[in-house]
Every structure is written in structure tokens, then in C-alpha cells.
Image (cartoon, rainbow, N blue to C red):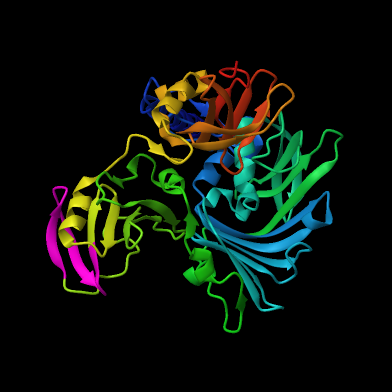
Amino acid sequence: MLIHMNKLLWIVVAALAMLIIIGCVLSVPQNASPVHNNSGPVFWENTTVQKSLHEMSGEEIAAEFIRHNTNLSGYSATVHTIGGTGYEDEEYLFFTERPDRFRAEYIRSEIHGNGTIVVANRTFVWQYHPGTRTAKPDLIDDPRNTFFAWRDYPAIAARILENFPAVRNGTENRNGSTAIILEATVDGIPTQYYPSPFSRTRIWIDEDTLMMTRMELIGDYNETELAVDLTDFRVDPRLPDAMFDFVPPDGTEVSPAIADLLAPLNTSSMRPAKERFGRDLLLPAYLPEGYSFRYCLHYRDRDGRDSLVYSNGSGDLVFTQALKKDNASFAAPAGPETAIPVCNRTGTSWTESGTHHLRWNCGNSTCELAGTIANAEIARIAGSVEAPELINFAPDAIADPELIAAIALHDPSAQKMADSGGEIIGVGMSIKRGAKNSPGGIFPALVIRYNGLIVDVMVDPDAQKPVGRTIQVPNGAVVRDTGNQTVIEYDEKILFIFDPMEGTG
């Protein structure tokens, strides 16, 4: 009887277990399909499975690294570089708040000197030498083109991996952590990444932090052109503004002086103003009798001012335009102010030391007129201010600027740029370098701004045909000649493709 009861008990237990299993199975949605990971447990399709770097292909790891770098607003690290020359053997502490605040504190550097501090703070790049208590400031025209464009190595690595496919090339233990090694074959000479040619790159990606810990640029003969090691990473650190808003310590000799560095350039042409403001440049269409343009003061502060000085031989009239609205970098009015209408807007008029001033906002700019002529004339000039159609930068040499522009547009590239949104800046004189079958000289030229390029399309007025071009490219641009084409690239984008021979026959 006892044996029979034991059998019955086991049957009941087994039946209950079967019911539990069936209940669990029935509780699962019937359209669900299991997803397996490498460790064995089964997850259902609404469960996210995060792969480790070890499970990813080289391209997948590269994509993760690029994404991480894009989201990285700042970091600090110790950087050690070794290259083909002694100048590239450096060690420094590097701090950045992207996109335009950087600081490097050199532990060891032959080119900069041990202890040197280099700081970029949107307006200036400072080099400070504590040993000699000297400092050198330089103005920043474009943060992407500063000294630091070659020091943010994770950003350089990301740009390379965006353009060239990567494969996995093993792993390595670095600083107590495992790094996946990616390798990419580079096609051509990408001078926007590094000033010397290289054929391959190896990049070490830390599997825990997704930070780059090493990069090697390798030449055609398997020689290492540059090796970069990064250690002691801190990601998105909270850095005080004082690290980047550099103030030279007391007793520092600053050369050149900030006042000299920011002093305006005195030019005999309006061209610097036109290149700064582009289509937004404004000029007086009316001038009192006897007044004509004399020179331009091109200021180099961040507000971007240009003052055009007109004179009648006994007095000056100054028209100033600034990039920013609402007074920009102008001094505050020093006399009683009067509101007067200017171009359907309200301007401010005042008199200071015998000079009448009128200031108003126009579009995205602030404008000001100043002169000793009557207030009514100042107001009339202000009411005539407009965007000019074509500027003659060389009125003494070019009598018919419209003819020069028409001839220049016979150049197919010039016409293509103009038709594709290029801006015709004006006409001026340009220097053509001589070649074997083409003599050089000074020619009138149509100036076109297109896609970051400034192109002088030179013409021969007597033969009434284009005779050549000079092209101003952004710092860091790559120019590739392929025989019948000249390709200009910047930041991995093609700006324009020229045919060197077209339009010059």
C-alpha cells in the first residue's frame, strides 16, 4: 500500500509540473521568436541585445567609434607623439571643449619648448612660455584651421574611418584594458588629416570607453610616419573657463601687442569688405558733390567691421558696417541722441566733437555714418545705402567693369559657378603667372566667390577672351591635378572641379 501511495504521489507531482510548463509556454506570444546570444540564455524579440566590440566587424566598430566621437563634447588626455622628425616627439596634456576651445600644456617639446602652454579661446591662439615670461597671440580666422586641428587626434581618426573602410586586426592590452585594433587602407594623400603622405592607418579603440588610445599612420614602405598614444582620459570634464580664456600673468611680455593685432588694415580697395560681407555688403548710392572713395579700414575683431572712407579733399565721410546688430563693437554715443527714420527703420543721431553721427540696423548688420557735413546730408546718404550690383575695385585701370564681367563669363567654369549660386564680388586687377605657352602679366579680372573659393577670372580686353584664373582656397584644402582636371576638396567634400584648359583658347 505504501509503494502504491508513493507512485500515486509521483504521478500527481509530475502532472503538476507538466501543467506549470504548459502554462508558461501558453503565456508566451505565439508569434515571438527567440534571439540567442553567445552566452546561452534565450531572450525574446522585444529584448535589446547589446553586442560587445568583440562580436562586431571592423566596420561596425568604426561606426560605433564615429558615433561616440560625434557625441563627445570634450575630453582631456595625456598625448605622446613620435614621428619622423624630432619635432614630432612631444608629450603634452591636452584639454578640449569642442568645437573651438583647446589647451595644450607641453611636458616635453622641441618645437614649442618644455613648459609651453598653447590656448585657443575662439578669438585668439596664445602661446605662453613661462620660462621667459613671454606670450604670442594670433587671431583665429577659422577654428577648424588652427594649430589644434592637428591635435584633436580622435577627431582625425573619426574622419579617416568615415572615408575609408576598416577591418579588424587583432587586440592588445593597453593600460589595463583591452583595445580592438582597426586598420584602414588610405587611397591618395589626405593632407587634411596629416601634412605628410601615408598609405595605411591603425587605430586602437578601447572596448570599455570607445576612446582611441593609439593611432599609427604608416607610409608606403611600412614605416611609421606618426604614432600617437593617449592616456589618462577624462571624458566631458567640467573645465573652468579660465583654462581657455587666457590672461597673460603680470610681468609677461606680449608680442605683438593686442592693440596692434586688432588694429585695422588700411587698404586702397573695397575688396576686403566685399569678401567679408558678400551679398550683404552695403554702399552709399548717393554722395555729396566732390566726395569719392579713398580707402578702407578692415578691422580684425570678432564683430567684423569695415569702414569706407570718402573724402572731398578737405573733409572725410566715414561709412562703417559691422556684422553684428545692435551697436556691434561701436562705442556708445557721446552726446544727446535723436531718433530719426532711416530706410523704414529708426536710427539714432548725435553730434560729437563737431562730427555728426547716424547709426541704424540694416538686415543683420549695424551701419554708421560719420562726417562734418550737415545732418540732413547724413540722413540723405543713409537713405541711399543699398547692395551694389558690381564693384569696380580698380577704377583707375578698368574703365568698363561691365564689359570685363561679360567677357569673363565666357569661361565655362565661371559661368557654371555664377549659374549655380556663385556670388559675383566685382572686378579688379589680378596677376597671372607665366607658363611655357602662356605669357604672364597683370590683367583685369572678374572676382567670383563660390563654395568657399574665391576665383579671379582674368580677361584680355583687346582680344575679348578669358586668359586664365587664380584661385584662393580655404586653409587645409586639398588640390589634386589629374591631367585634364583640377579637383579642389575641403573637409572631405569636393568644392569644384576645373578644366585647366577651358575658356583660355
In which quadrant will I find the C terminus? top right
Q: Is residue 311 above or below residue 200?
A: below
Q: Percent from the top left, x then y, of residue 186? A: 71, 31
Determine which quarter of the picture holds residue 80.
bottom right
Q: Percent from the top left, x then y, of residue 395? A: 43, 40
Q: Is residue 380 left or right of residue 179?
A: left
Q: Nearer the viewer, residue 36 or 327?
A: 327
Q: Is residue 490 left or right of residue 435?
A: left
Determine which quarter of the picture holds residue 196.
top right
- Is residue 328 in view? yes
Residue at position x 48%, y 65% from top? 263
| 345 is within the stretch colored magenta | yes
| 107 is within the stretch colored magenta | no
Q: Percent from the top left, x then y, of residue 308? A: 37, 54
Q: Is residue 4 above or below residue 269?
A: above
Q: Nearer the viewer, residue 82 or 204?
A: 82
Q: Nearer the viewer, residue 10 or 356?
A: 356
| Span of residues in magenta | 337-357
- Name the magenta segment's main secondary structure: strand
The mark total stands at 0
Residue at position x 73%, y 68% from top? 107
- Is residue 56 in view? no
Residue at position x 36%, y 59% from top? 313
Q: Nearer the viewer, residue 469 or 113?
A: 469
Residue farthest along the top direction in this orientation:
505
Q: Percent from the top left, x then y, of residue 88? A: 78, 54
Q: Is residue 221 above or below residue 243?
A: above
